[in-house]
Image (tube, rainbow, N blue to C red):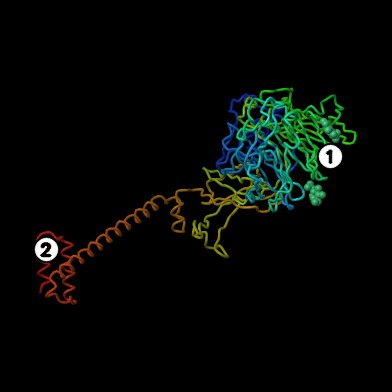
């Protein structure tokens, strides 16, 4: 069925003009690493590259129109750890081109003052399981409009950057505090990474609220094995590991901490712990034989349905400690009057992936659940009741748990991208290749041709075609063909009859023009001369003419240099002669017209014969009348 599908899509794509390589379909060689840990593809129209994914399962139930996958592939096998958007078929939609934001994490879409923004963290993630960096906001034109920081001396952490409906952002910070580590066998006056979060006003950057784990959690709550450290502030021990914070309608916070296996509900005013799900001080009676509260090393806890449901990604493992059979998304029903917890649904992917770090779980509007497996390069979309519908590997399965390719979280959102840049066009042979990094509204590409173009305000191309062109002098473009956009890059082919220039115009689904690419030249040999002289030389005999023009220009230049040299030398001679006159100043008279004529003649003789021989005598004789 898959091979049938891939054959059909290959056929369809070759007709439609997709230039991308199509995704792998349940390819065993891919997962064995036969094409490398992170198979990528290059394009002709842009330098950016895209991963080639392996689609293990797909379903129309994952194809909500206008929804995309947001991730941050990074790791040893990833050349640039940049944020990335893919469509549901695994095609590249956008990636950050070149700009260096360090390692990046947690790309998502968030709303601020009614506008949608891309948000992500970028910085140094080699601090010890967390990060120190900045938070970035990009608008729908992919312009970076804000760079935000945490408040205080320690840069913001990578784990959380989340906008509330009230125009505030919540971010995680790993402060350094003192804590008694003796329960773990460490120093009594120990030092720890103090899992903290801040709520800041997005408008002003003002700190509105701060919470620190060390005021509420002790080393006794910790499951993370103590293997030394924590003896000084330069080597703190990570005992809590905050990794998600969300705020609810009541103004309280839900916090996930990996090393205490806790999901904690925190009073938004006092910071007091209201209750705790999981961990050593669990407050809930587990109605599911322990399966509702036994999550460990988990990530991404969130409330749903007015706080009666909690979802979380349960890793079930950490480095070197693979305690569970598989990682799972969990949907837990809680009753905070009876203090009971019940496991509603588990979301386990077909490979029974057991991911020892990172990961995410998102419940979408249609009830489907997207789970990102963090350290393992796979994301799976499930039906609400836990059936895996779509399953995508973005690196070889053989590379999972190696650190070669990973994405902290994977999100799915609706997004409209309208790049500030023009579409990228490259003409090669009889094909035009076009792509437009980040554009989500392109439905069709129209290839257009023209005999002349405006280049830096000057007209280049065929002068003849300007005649008969009514109205102001501009470019006259004529459509050649229209092709539906599929994938990231599209190829449009043209015949030998094509005019000198082509460009590609993007149309949306209603046929409205979104943008046009810069023109590309279909025949490159006449380009320079054509632009320089503002008219088009006939293609057939253009080469001899260009050579002739170049030779002519060269000859003119040489003549110019020779003339300038002679003039300069003439000036030197005049100066020398004036000096001689001055030396014999006694009976020198003014040089009249006749004398000047003779002088010129003499200089001419000097130029002809040089100053050798008895030239000086001749000069003296001439001047001393
Ligand atoms: C938003 O602000 C209102 C009023 O200040 C407050 O009651 C509410 O809890 C806040 N909600 C969030 C999500 O911060
Ligand atoms: C939760 O458990 C702790 C002890 O483990 C207890 O002190 C606290 O009162 C309990 N809270 C609730 C809301 O049950």
Residue 382 visible, this orientation = yes
Q: Position of residue 553 (x, y in %)?
A: 35, 56
Q: Position of residue 309 (x, y in %)?
A: 83, 36
Q: Is residue 70 or residue 128 the one in the foreground?
A: 128
Q: Quadrant of the N terminus?
A: top right
Please identify, in this view, whether the residue under mark 2 or under mark 1 is nearer the observer: 1
**Residue 10 versus residue 624 in the image, above or below:** above
Closer to the chain start, of discs 2 and 1, is 1
Q: Position of residue 472 (x, y in %)?
A: 56, 65
Q: Which residue is the site of mark 1?
A: 307
Q: CA distance from mark 2 to mark 1?
A: 110 Å
- The residue at the far front in this view is 188
Q: Quadrant of the C terminus?
A: bottom left
Q: Position of residue 513 (x, y in %)?
A: 65, 53
Q: Is mark 1 within 8 Å of ligand 1?
A: no
Disc sitting over residue 615 in the figure: 2
Disc sitting over residue 22 in the figure: none
Residue 586 as seen in the image, left or right of residue 296: left
Q: Is residue 152 or residue 123 the one in the foreground?
A: 152
Q: Is mark 2 within 8 Å of ligand 1?
A: no
**Image quadrant assignment for residue 604:** bottom left
Q: Would you call the spot at circle 1 few (<14 residues within 10 Å), some (14-19), or many (20 or more)?
A: some
């Amino acid at each position: 069925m898959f091979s049938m599908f891939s054959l059909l899509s290959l056929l369809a794509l070759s007709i439609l003009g997709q230039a991308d390589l199509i995704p792998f379909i349940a390819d065993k060689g891919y997962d064995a690493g036969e094409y490398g840990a992170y198979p990528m593809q290059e394009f002709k129209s842009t330098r950016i590259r895209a991963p080639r994914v392996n689609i293990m399962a797909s379903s129309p139930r994952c194809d909500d129109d206008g929804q995309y996958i947001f991730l941050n592939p990074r790791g040893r096998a990833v050349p640039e750890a940049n944020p990335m958007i893919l469509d549901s078929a695994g095609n590249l939609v956008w990636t950050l081109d070149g700009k260096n934001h360090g390692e990046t994490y947690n790309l998502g879409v968030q709303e601020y003052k009614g506008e949608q923004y891309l948000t992500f963290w970028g910085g140094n993630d080699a601090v010890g399981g967390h990060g120190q960096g900045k938070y970035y906001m990009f608008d729908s034109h992919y312009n970076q409009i804000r760079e935000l920081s945490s408040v205080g001396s320690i840069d913001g952490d990578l784990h959380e950057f989340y906008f509330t409906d009230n125009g505030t952002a919540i971010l995680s910070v790993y402060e350094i505090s003192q804590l008694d580590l003796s329960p773990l066998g460490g120093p009594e006056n120990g030092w720890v990474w103090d899992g903290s979060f801040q709520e800041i006003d997005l408008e002003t950057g003002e700190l509105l609220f701060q919470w620190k784990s060390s005021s509420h959690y002790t080393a006794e709550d910790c499951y993370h094995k103590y293997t030394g450290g924590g003896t000084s502030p330069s080597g703190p021990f990570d005992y809590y590991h905050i990794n998600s914070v969300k705020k609810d309608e009541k103004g309280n916070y839900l916090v996930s901490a990996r090393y205490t296996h806790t999901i904690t509900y925190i009073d938004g005013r006092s910071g007091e712990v209201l209750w705790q799900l999981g961990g050593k001080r669990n407050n809930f009676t587990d109605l599911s034989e322990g399966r509702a509260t036994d999550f460990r090393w988990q990530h991404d806890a969130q409330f749903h349905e007015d706080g009666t449901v909690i979802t979380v990604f349960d890793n079930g493992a950490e480095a070197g400690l693979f305690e569970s059979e598989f990682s799972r998304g969990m949907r837990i029903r809680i009753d905070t009057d009876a203090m009971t917890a019940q496991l509603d649904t588990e979301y386990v992917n077909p490979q029974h992936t057991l991911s020892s770090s990172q990961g995410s779980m998102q419940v979408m509007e249609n009830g489907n659940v997207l789970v990102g497996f963090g350290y393992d390069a796979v994301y799976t979309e499930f039906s609400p009741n836990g059936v895996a519908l779509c399953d995508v590997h973005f690196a070889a399965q053989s590379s999972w748990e190696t650190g070669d390719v990973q994405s902290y979280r994977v999100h799915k959102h609706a997004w409209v991208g309208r790049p500030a840049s023009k579409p990228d066009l490259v003409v090669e042979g009889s094909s035009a290749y076009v792509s437009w990094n980040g554009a989500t509204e392109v439905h069709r590409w129209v290839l257009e041709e023209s005999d002349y173009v405006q280049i830096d305000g000057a007209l280049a191309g065929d002068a003849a075609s300007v005649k008969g062109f009514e109205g102001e002098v501009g470019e006259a473009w004529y459509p050649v063909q229209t092709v539906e956009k599929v994938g990231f890059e599209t190829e449009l082919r043209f015949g030998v009859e094509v005019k000198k220039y082509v460009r590609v115009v993007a149309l949306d689904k209603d046929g409205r023009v979104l943008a046009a690419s810069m023109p590309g030249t279909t025949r490159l040999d006449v380009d320079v001369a054509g632009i320089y002289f503002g008219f088009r030389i006939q293609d057939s005999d253009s080469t001899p003419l260009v050579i002739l023009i170049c030779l002519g220009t060269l000859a003119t230049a040489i003549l110019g240099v020779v003339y300038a040299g002679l003039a300069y030398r003439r000036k030197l001679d005049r100066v020398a002669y004036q000096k001689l006159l001055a030396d014999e100043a006694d009976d020198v008279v003014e040089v009249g017209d006749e004398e000047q004529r003779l002088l010129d003649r003499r200089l001419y003789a000097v130029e002809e014969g040089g100053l050798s021989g008895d030239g000086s005598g001749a000069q003296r004789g001439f001047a001393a009348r």
